[in-house]
Image: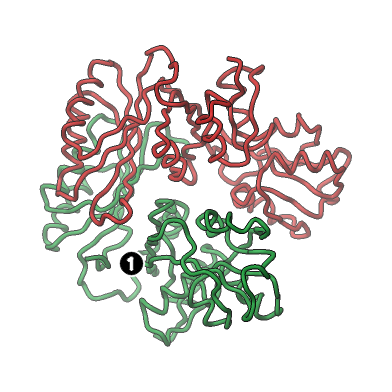
Chain colours: A red, B green
Amino acid sequence: MGKPVAIQGIKGSFHYQVAKEYFNSNQSVLECMSFDSTVDSLINGTSDYSIIALENSIAGFIIPNYALIDSNDLEISGEYYLDIQHHLMALPDQSIKDIIEVQSHPMALLQCKTFLKRFPHIKLVEAKDTAAIAKDIRDQNLKGIAAIASQRAAELFNLEILGYSIQSIKHNETRFAIVKRKGNIGNARTMDKASLKFVLGHKRGSLATMLNVMSDCKLNLTKIQSIPIIDVPWKYAFFVDVTFDNTEDYLKAKSILMIMAEQFKVLGEYKNARL
Amino acid sequence: MGKPVAIQGIKGSFHYQVAKEYFNSNQSVLECMSFDSTVDSLINGTSDYSIIALENSIAGFIIPNYALIDSNDLEISGEYYLDIQHHLMALPDQSIKDIIEVQSHPMALLQCKTFLKRFPHIKLVEAKDTAAIAKDIRDQNLKGIAAIASQRAAELFNLEILGYSIQSIKHNETRFAIVKRKGNIGNARTMDKASLKFVLGHKRGSLATMLNVMSDCKLNLTKIQSIPIIDVPWKYAFFVDVTFDNTEDYLKAKSILMIMAEQFKVLGEYKNARL
């Protein structure tokens, strides 16, 4: 693969880590400042793949990112799970007493607030990107300022870790999708998982009927989320993930569900990354 | 009701608006700087009710707020829907050309980015609270700075609206819960909606079986969200909202579901705010 993989954030971000681990450590990346611009790079062909966070075990589904995949007619070609560990890092040869300010993404600050409460002398400052702060600290030689970011960011920008895994909930697994243009040269058909979106009218039991079909066809539901459709009261879209042992079972279920739902769309068929 | 209602944010915030509209316009409020501290005020008895945003039509469920209600054993005693309209406001007698900086909550800036792109000379600055900026502009007489906030904030702080409803998606409905301590003196039993949480093992068809019971007992599902349980692979919690015409039907379903699920909890039984 000659083209870079588009990631949200800069080198050292969690999306960067996923690109390196899912593809390989030599994979080049295109640093993007928003999820929107990773999608732009797919559409204009600058990249063939983009890494997009879909959900995490603390905050749940990241709905705007599902909408991005859905509305731009992209396709999920794979998934990757990363256990997000937040470390406190600063320029070498400082102790936590020397730190007067911690900068990070609001979500990272929130997840580490119990740890940070023990150091009331430290000012907390919200910033855009976890890795970008680490880079700034190195580039601008900022003493007294710490970042909360990944181990990889500490390595890349040569910072010293003052606190390991400082987030309150020790396992914060985030699920990332590897996204491509629809119909692009795809992976081998080793699929055993699919992400589906369908729309149902507000008829009692309509969702139960759909789930019965999935169950009869031996699909396992691993995720379900309803979303009211804006401007259409009482009509819901459902985002559902299923796993299966047998492709035939899945294809059979798909052909039935397609007829039953008002709208039915496959967002991706890919390899389940979790055993 | 003598006690103030705890709201996240200050007077002029969207939570403030909900307190005024759900209770009455004379209702006093307790301004809290986080959802956590609204919950603290319930627990220590400073307030009997708190207003907590649960979901919006753009971003979906606000999972941490569900977790807050669930883990502190609080109860949803009512709901309220508010169509969030973002207005651009500043001190009087300025035009948009005089504005050099717009401050607001990151979510508000995101929702208004298409509008703001038309004014590339304006710097965008993230801030904590939409109404707090409006207050700062008035208190500190900040010329050249605009806030994105509610109509009520403009009225309260006597600012002039330079752009009405500048968000990209015109209807951004947010659902708020009115939350109280469990067992607190409740509303009359005019309930026709319930918020449930239950846990299911990863057995194929287990969710379908639950939904079949709901459907058989004439419950209408208005919301469903699965959440993986941290540290317990393949076990899921489901947050489900149902409406019903007949309380007997609901009580029957509840007694069956309680036996079927591994864990079953009623987060609230209340009056449906939507026709």
Q: Residue at x 72, y 50 (%)?
A: A103
Residue where numbered disc 1 is placed:
B79
Q: Position of residue B76 (x, y in %)?
A: 34, 65
Say which of A110 and B104 sits in front.
B104
Q: Residue at x 23, y 54 (%)?
A: A234
Where is residue A105? Give x, y as percent. 64, 48
Comparing B236 with A141, the one in front is A141
Q: Residues within 10 Å of mark 1 (few under 14, many from 20)?
A: many
Q: Is residue A118 left or right of residue A76?
A: right
Q: Nearer the viewer, residue A212 or B42?
A: A212
A200 versus A75 height, above or below: below
Left or right, A211 with reference to B137: left
* Quarter of image, res B180: bottom left
What residue lies at 27% left-to-right and 15% top-to-bottom? A246
Q: Residue A43, percent across and down?
A: 50, 31
Q: Residue at x 16, y 57 (%)?
A: B250
Residue A249, x across and y down, in percent: 23, 19
Q: Amino acid at mark 1?
A: Glu
